[in-house]
Image: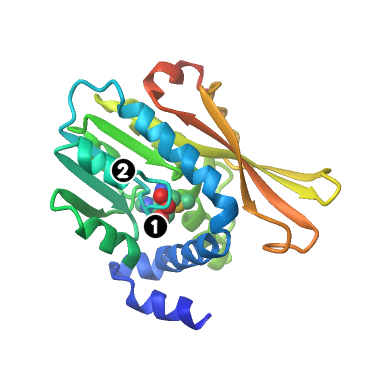
Amino acid sequence: MLLDLALWLATPAPWRHRRLGYVRESVLLSARARRCRRVWAPHAAHTRAAVLAACADLPLRREAVVLGSGPLADVPLAELAAAFERVVLVDAVHPLSARLAARRFGHVRLVTADLTGAGDPVGDLCGRADLTVSANLLTQLPVVPVDRHEAAGLPVPERLGAEIVAAHLAALGRLPGRVCLVTDTEQRTEDRAGRVTDRLDLLFGVSLPPAPLSWDWELAPFGEAERHRRLVHSVRAYPDWAAARDGLSLP
Ligand SMILES: C[S@@+](CC[C@H](N)C(=O)[O-])C[C@H]1O[C@@H](n2cnc3c(N)ncnc32)[C@H](O)[C@@H]1O
């Protein structure tokens, strides 16, 4: 708790991102990542492998941009830094640990940006990239905007989540370079007998095409969120999103 408060105070971020709750979300994410490091390890390894698969056959490796780089738990930073002339890490909040990791490489740059912000931030940041990675970001994009409505006691617009998800996918679809998309899609709540007691569509009705890679991510093992329930996320990875996205279906 005290560590979280200290991290909240010490994490550099624009005042707007702090006020909107991005720093709070980032500190909570890092805290859960520390607690769940062991059970999250396979998810991180699968994500890193998908990113490396995305750049394996790329003829040009000038610039790689990672959207949602956050704590860098699932970004193969050293490998990207070795393979590309420039690496750009983009997030609303770069935790101190990520800042330290990036500092080891002279050609890795951090960009602090709200990817749901006005205009086309994805197009502006990734328009020249040979590789863009959307790294477990998609379902996080609606979190702060939805929370903002709820905190203000305002009704959440019915299509807000779906619009944010669809806008990010559309922005990725317009990029000229290779796009690697890794995202969770659904949350299952399971009891200790293995029964599914609840399901939550994390994409607000947007249906992704079949993916070449998929796995389960045990987001909250028993005892993390609830003593006798665990949360498991289904994850899909598309090392080459352009080859798959024709099957995308919007609500
Ligand atoms: C689940 S984390 C991604 C994990 C990360 N790829 C890693 O390697 O550890 C989701 C990230 O999305 C970021 N994020 C959420 N909403 C955002 C927004 N509107 N703009 C930019 N980043 C955002 C969060 O700050 C967080 O770092």
Q: Nearer the viewer, residue 138 or 250?
A: 138
List x then y, in percent, for residue 232.
66, 46
Crowding at mark 1 (Cα within 10 Å: few <14, some 14-19, many 20+) = many
List x then y, in percent, for residue 7.
40, 75
Which residue corresponds to the image point at 55% horizontal and 63% vertical from the top-left? 32
Q: What whole-number distance in Å separates the C-alpha atoms at marks 2 and 1? A: 12 Å
Q: How many marks?
A: 2
What is the quadrant of residue 184 in the picture? Answer: top right
Which residue corresponds to the image point at 19% horizontal and 52% vertical from the top-left? 109
- Tag 2 near tag 1, CB within 8 Å: no
Which residue corresponds to the image point at 21% horizontal and 40% vertical from the top-left? 82
Q: Residue 71: which numbered mark, if any?
A: 1
Q: Nearer the viewer, residue 83 or 134?
A: 83
Q: Secondary structure at mark 2?
A: strand
Horizontal placement of 39 versus 82: left or right? Answer: right
> Does mark 1 have its CB less than 8 Å from ligand 1?
yes
List x then y, in percent, for residue 79.
28, 40
The residue at the far right in this view is 193
Q: Nearer the viewer, residue 135 or 160?
A: 135
Quarter of the figure with the C terminus: top right
Q: Residue 66: which numbered mark, if any?
A: 2
- In the rendered structure, which amino acid carries the disc numbered 2? Val
Q: Secondary structure at mark 1?
A: loop
In this view of the protein, can residue 134 be seen by the observer? Answer: yes
List x then y, in percent, for residue 13.
30, 67
Q: Is residue 151 above or below residue 113?
A: below
> Does mark 2 have its CB less than 8 Å from ligand 1?
yes
Horizontal placement of 251 versus 3: left or right? Answer: right
